[in-house]
Every structure is written in structure tokens, then in C-alpha cells.
Amino acid sequence: MRLLLIGFGTVGQGLAELLIEKEKAFLDEYELKTQVVGISDMLKGSVYNADGIDLDTALKLAKSGGKISGLPDKYEGDALSMIKAAEADMMVEVTYTDIKTAEPATSHIRAALEKGMHVTTTNKGPTALYFHELAKLAKDKGVKFLFEGTVMSGTPLLNLIRETLAGSSISEIKGILNGTTNYILSQMEEGHAYENVLKKAQELGYAEAVPDADVLGWDALAKVTILANAVFGARCKPNDFPCKGITDITVDAIAEAKSRGKRFKLIGRVWREGDQVKGSVSPEEVDMTHPLAAIMGATNAVTISTDALGDVTIVGPGAGRTETGYSTLVDIIHAGGKR
């Protein structure tokens, strides 16, 4: 399985580490040998070699703050030109997310699918805005378009629904889809002011310098849209659903809710209402008896309401270098491994 890595930041490097670590397991368990033939990153440069690149050296350069374009296999073009020229079986698209335009990731994915490459992505933009178009293109080309890491990082929510819950009817999916806001609310429950907790979250790397995507609910909204389209078959865009973040919640409101046996959580929700699929993101007071109320810190959790099993709750990490890299590793196995 010849791979292109488009994006070599936190997630791309996390995947590269896993590919090296699990090389023997891939061969033994799935009869799958992987070879990275190209890497393209806006900041770190690009390398391409149809016979395979030195992944160990590329990782060492990237981790030390150097440019991978310092390797002998330097590639002069941009990511899109590499995709169009490369001899590869699968593209891993892990560039930054732009939820408004979904670029340049969507162009990367379209180009790879057009060439007949399998695609895995952790990028929420293309999957939230163009899921049906990209899924149809993949089907027409006889390849797979996979995106496990777009909703709960390495926690296998989409695979759980697609495989283990196959045959059950799902009426609602709701949960904590953003670890940053859950961390902030957890700390505020201990009496810390929002501004101080946000600063700490930024220091820990949970929140960006401009934290709007998290605290205003946009990140969770993108994930809600992906679930609406990929699981419920809707044809929705993020702005079709109401969205409210956590910036108006106070320490006093959290304490008052707790006195009534409730706990504030930012809840992303998708559900069926007759023939319609609806979605929302908003802070909710969750009863302390519900499994979601027990989820504290930067952890994610989702409850899936089914006809056959009732409520099924899955808990796990919603971000992280290795965790998100793992989601793409699973997709690579699905595309090329023998099970």
C-alpha cells in the first residue's frame, strides 16, 4: 500500500510513528505492507520518491523543527501537483481544517479520488460540506473514502455505527464532541473563572490562541453535520443547525445546576423527527444519572439511541497526536488489509 501523506504536522507525524511501530503487526495480522512514497506540508516542505522515502529521517527532521525538503528526495511542486503526479494507492489528508471553505483539503481529496486512490482524512471541512459528492466520486471510481478521525479522533464512533451497530435503527446521537469545552466546564465546576481556565487550556494545547472554533461550538457543529450526513443520510450544511457555545455560562450557573443534580455539558445532537433529520449544538444541563454527566476533562463521549440495544455510550479521546493518527491507521487497514 503506497501512501501519500498530505500534511505532516501533529497528526501526520503521529501516523508516521505508528506506521514504523506497527510495521511487523501489519504484515502478520493483515498481510499489509505500507510504504510512504510522498509527504507534502505547507510549512515543512515536500518529498517524493516512488520507491519509498526514509520515514525515520523525515520524522527526525520534522520533530527538530527542520524542513523535510532537506532530504535528497525534495519535491518542488505543491500538494495538489504531487497528488496528480504520484504513483500511490492511498492518500492521507491531514491538513488544517477550514470549516467555511473546506479548502485546500477538498481539492486534495477530489484529485486523489479522481486518480483512483483510496482516501482517509481527519479534516472536518470536506466531510461536513461535501460528504455526498465525495462519497459518490469514491464509489464511481471504485475506491474508499474514509473519515473515522473527523468526529472523535481515534475513538471508533463511525466504525462502531457502521459495523457493530449494523442492522439497528438509530434515532438519535448526542454527546460531548469537543474536549476543550468539556475541560473548561469541568474546571469551572471547581470554581475557576472562565477566563483563567481558557488561558490554562491554551497553555496545555487544548485550545488555540483564537479559541472560537471550540468555545463558540463550531467544531462540534462540524461533527454534528458529519453525523447527520454520513449516518442519517441527510444533505445538510453546518449553518442548517442552531449552534451556541459556552461563553455565556458562569461559575454560578454551573454551581446552581449542580445543586439540582445537573451538570452543564456542551452537547452536539442529531436526531430524527418524522422524515426530517435535525441537529443542534448547545450547552445543556445533563442529569447526573446519565453516563455523559460523568465525563470530565478533555474526554469525548457519545450516546447512540438504537431500537435493538437501547442506548449505547462510547467514551474515549477526542484529540491527540497518536489518537488521531490511529484513526487514519484504522482506515488504511480497512482500505488495504486482509482480515
Image (cartoon, rainbow, N blue to C red):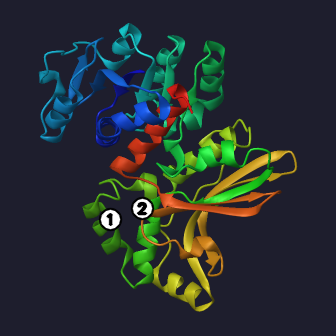
Query: Which residue is the site of mark 1?
Result: 201
Q: Considering the image in quadrants, where does the C terminus appear? A: top right
Q: What element carries label 2?
A: helix
Q: In this view, does 336 lie above or below 286?
A: above
Number of residues whose C-alpha sits closer than 10 Å to that of mark 2, classed few (under 14), some (14–19) or many (20 or more) = many
Which sits earlier in the primary sequence, circle 1 or circle 2?
2
Percent across and percent down for residue 325 are 39, 42
Identify the image quadrant of residue 33. top left
| Residue extending furthest toward the right | 274
| Residue extending furthest toward the bottom | 259
- Mark pair 1, 2: CA separation: 7 Å
Work out whether residue 243 can be spotted. yes
Q: Is residue 122 left or right of residue 287?
A: left
Mark 1 and mark 2 in contact? Answer it, CB < 8 Å: yes
Q: Is residue 115 left or right of residue 278?
A: left
Q: What element carries label 1?
A: helix
Percent across and percent down for residue 246 are 50, 66
Number of residues whose C-alpha sits closer than 10 Å to that of mark 1, classed few (under 14), some (14–19) or many (20 or more) = many
Percent across and percent down for residue 50 are 30, 11
For this rendering, which residue is in front, 248 or 63?
A: 63
Give the residue at x 33% y 54%. Answer: 208
Amino acid type of the residue that numbered disc 2 sits on in the rendered structure: Thr
Work out whether residue 101 can be spotted. no
Q: Is residue 220 left or right of residue 241?
A: left
Give the residue at x 42% y 78%. Answer: 188
Q: Considering the image in quadrants, where does the N terminus appear? A: top left
For this rendering, which residue is in front, 108 or 289?
A: 289
Q: Is residue 192 left or right of residue 68?
A: right
Q: Is residue 143 above or below residue 226?
A: above
Give the residue at x 51% y 87%. Answer: 255
Query: Which residue is the site of mark 2?
Result: 180
Amino acid type of the residue that numbered disc 1 sits on in the rendered structure: Ala
